[in-house]
Amino acid sequence: MRGKSVLLVIGGGIAAYKALELIRRLAERGVKTRAILTSAGAQFVTPLSVAALTGNRVFSDLFSLTDESEMGHIELSRAADLVVVAPATADLMGKLAAGLANDLASTALIATDKPILMAPAMNVRMWQSPPVRRNLETLKSDGVLFVGPGDGEMACGEFGPGRMAEPLEIIAAIEAALTNHGGPLNGLKALVTAGPTQEPLDPIRFLANRSSGKQGYAIAGALAAAGADVALVSGPVEIAPPPHVNLIKVGTARQMLRACEAQLPADIAVMSAAVADWRPESPASGKIKKDDGRAVPEIRLVENPDILATLAKSSNRPRLLIGFAAETDHVRAHASAKRARKGADWILANDVSADGEGRSVMGGDRNQIHLITVETEESWPEMSKADAARRLVQHIVRHFQETQT
Ligand code: CTP
């Protein structure tokens, strides 16, 4: 840790006093700290004590000309190796989850290109409330790291989870974040495909499918949060890429294949794209018109390359190759046969039949997955796509830990 630097955001909560001890412990380990004190935080600890302990001036005002001329708020957010928020209040978590930036702390959190570690502290009911749970999910799927909160008696007299982690626990989490750059897949290259492909009929029409890209984007985010270097090859979707991934946008299956091949060699490949199986044989160069009393046009289709099967046969085959199987019946049996046929190591099977109201997992936020490998089969309960992504990444981490030992 020696020689590293941390930007510490101190939010407004009784646990702010522990932030002072955290600064001392960091200094003992040779870590430099700069601090942002929110106006609520300044109700609990004084700027003077924070400045004395950090040996640096304390930043608190977004629109301070002196601060901006000394070090702009964007630079401040990026100069450190890690941003730590302690205590992370419901307010700071909510602002970051929603993308709000109305003071220096929230602006720095959005502007940083460094990992963020939050140590939440709040009343137990607040911690368990639906909005805070939602924000926690969002932040985790954005790659934000968390330490605590712990269980215990709280300053407000209630008992339960919500107490900020102790300074030494936060130090351990900081050390892990700094040494791993956030995770156990550090040093590994991952390739993820996501979304549909669009196969043109003419310049304005195409064949495609309902894939939203949400599951693949969540996987790319979870791999990046675990420290992998991630290339996300994506068909056209309407969602924003997760932080710290290299997004490569493509249109057709053939473009997707070329983009994937250009990313090899890779240690991990997760093929979650819903690649169109067929494309119109010869897309028209101009708009196909319905005039001239001509008959309804016939569209001849030809088969697209299978990206998963092509990578499986490549001389540069990814070390761990994972496919998806979108099935509507005999889900596990079909998926297992698909794994073997395409030469994948693992396959994640999901049932994409519509429910009674016509909703499918395609486009939705939840997924129910069966993980099928050469020897094992495991059914996961229904969960959010973000949770399914994290669970997959845990399996990937375990796989690499086992194959390295
Ligand atoms: N896949 C691919 N290239 C294709 C078609 C599919 O890489 N041209 C990949 C998908 O990304 C997924 C897996 O193959 O990882 C299985 O996709 P799925 O649509 O379930 O299978 P299909 O090959 O289309 O088989 P079928 O339509 O017969 O179920």
Image: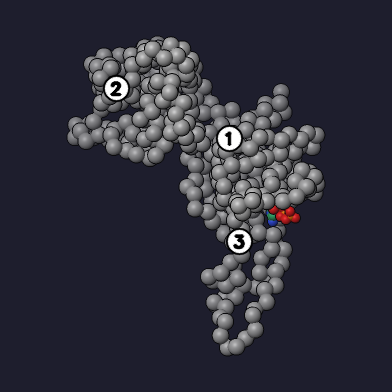
Category of crowding for the residue at label 3, using alpha-carbon neighbours closer than 10 angstroms: few (below 14), some (14–19), many (at least 20): many
Q: Is residue 374 left or right of residue 100?
A: right
Q: Label 3, secondary structure: give it.
A: loop
Is residue 27 among what the camera can see?
no
Task: Give the residue at x 71% y 35%.
Answer: 379
Q: Is residue 128 left or right of residue 45?
A: right
Farthest bottom residue in view: 292
Q: Is residue 10 left or right of residue 357?
A: left
Task: Give the residue at x 72% y 63%.
Answer: 303
Q: Which mark is residue 263?
A: none
The percent position of residue 22, horizontal first and vertical second, equals 39, 15
Quadrant for the C terminus in the image: top right
Q: Which mark is residue 41?
A: 2
In-front residue for pair 246/166: 166
* Whether residue 234 is situated above or below residue 226 in the rendered picture: below
Name the amino acid, label 1. Asp
The percent position of residue 236, horizontal first and vertical second, equals 54, 56
- Quarter of the image for residue 393 reads top right
Task: Give the residue at x 75% y 46%.
Answer: 331
Instruction: Name the image colouring.
Output: one colour
Name the amino acid, label 3. Ala
> Earlier along the polypeptide chain: callout 1 or callout 3?
3
Report which residue position mark 1 lands on: 387
Report which residue position mark 3 lands on: 208
